[in-house]
Image (tube, rainbow, N blue to C red):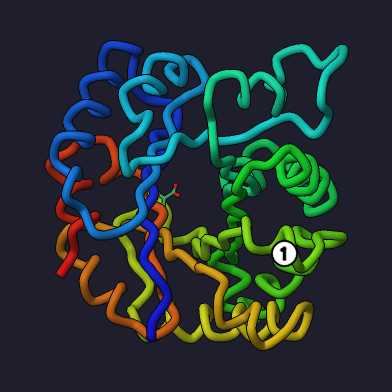
Amino acid sequence: MKRSYYIAGNWKMHKTRAEAAELAKALVDRLKDGKHKYLAAPSFTSLETVAPIVKGTNIRLGAQNCAAEEQGAHTGEVSVLQLKDLGVQTVILGHSERRHLYKEDDELINKKVRLALSRGFEVILCIGELLEEREAGRAEAVCQGQVRGGLDGVSAGDLGRVVIAYEPVWAIGTGKTATPQDADAVHAFVRKVVGGLYSPAAAEQIIIQYGGSVKPENAAELMAQENIDGALVGGAALKADTFVPIAQFG
Ligand code: PEP
């Protein structure tokens, strides 16, 4: 039997609190009978607003990042303790925008992953290659390095709270989607890497989302692939009218 599906929306640096509340309310209403697992990840500034709206529903509350340290003199950073206090359940880490615009490397991402897991969060670890890396035939090697680096020191027990999101960087926000077959091939490879690091059972169980211009029109075909267990959605997550059909694909 295939793993259960997990559809997550990353709202990035969009929406005021009022706009975030409006979207969250629409999602709660329209996904109340949804069959899958869902997540909404607003900006830090809207977490407190969205938390009571999604509480007790089938939509989890996610943050888009966290600091690598628990607390201290880290101007501008947000701690896992503060996220926990707001009711956040999941932290997205290693997003390509964090890796490439803000120069986060595997070592830093791994520190955040381990800290978030140690505080009981679920982690969505994002991985994915740049266009030039794909063109140089290095997509698998890059993903392998990011999986190994991101999960370094993560116990088999904690792995149950890790989701991997494969997001080819060239497909994020560009309107270009990996073909379902190409995406599935990388997902299968990533599953194999997890199997090598942990166990065949862990490989079989881990949820691997696809991200990169997922839209209502392509969601069902992507989700039909054997190794694709959900989606991490950016642009199309900003409106209920586009996120809901993805969340209810098929
Ligand atoms: C993302 O940022 O995680 C993402 C997949 O964005 P988009 O859906 O807009 O490509």
Residue furthest front as drawn: 56
The correct choice, above or below, for 202 with respect to 217 in the image is below
Q: Would the CB of label 1 be found within 8 Å of ligand 1?
A: no
Quadrant where the N terminus sits is bottom left
Corner quadrant of residue 157: bottom right
Which residue is more in the foreground, 90 or 141? 90
Query: Residue 208, position in %: x, y?
Result: 50, 68
The correct choice, above or below, for 102 with respect to 6 in the image is above
* Residue 149 horizontal side relative to residue 9, left or right: right
* Residue 54 horizontal side relative to residue 122, left or right: left
The correct choice, above or below, for 116 with respect to 132 in the image is above
Quadrant where the C terminus sits is bottom left
Which residue is more in the foreground, 103 or 218? 218
Query: Residue 94, position in %: x, y?
Result: 65, 48
Query: Residue 127, position in %: x, y?
Result: 61, 61
Regarding residue 136, the answer to whether it shows in the image is no
Q: Residue at x 53, y 25 (%)?
A: 87
Query: Residue 213, position in %: x, y?
Result: 33, 57
Q: Residue at x 69, y 63 (%)?
A: 159
Residue that carries the numbered disc 1 in the rendered image: 146
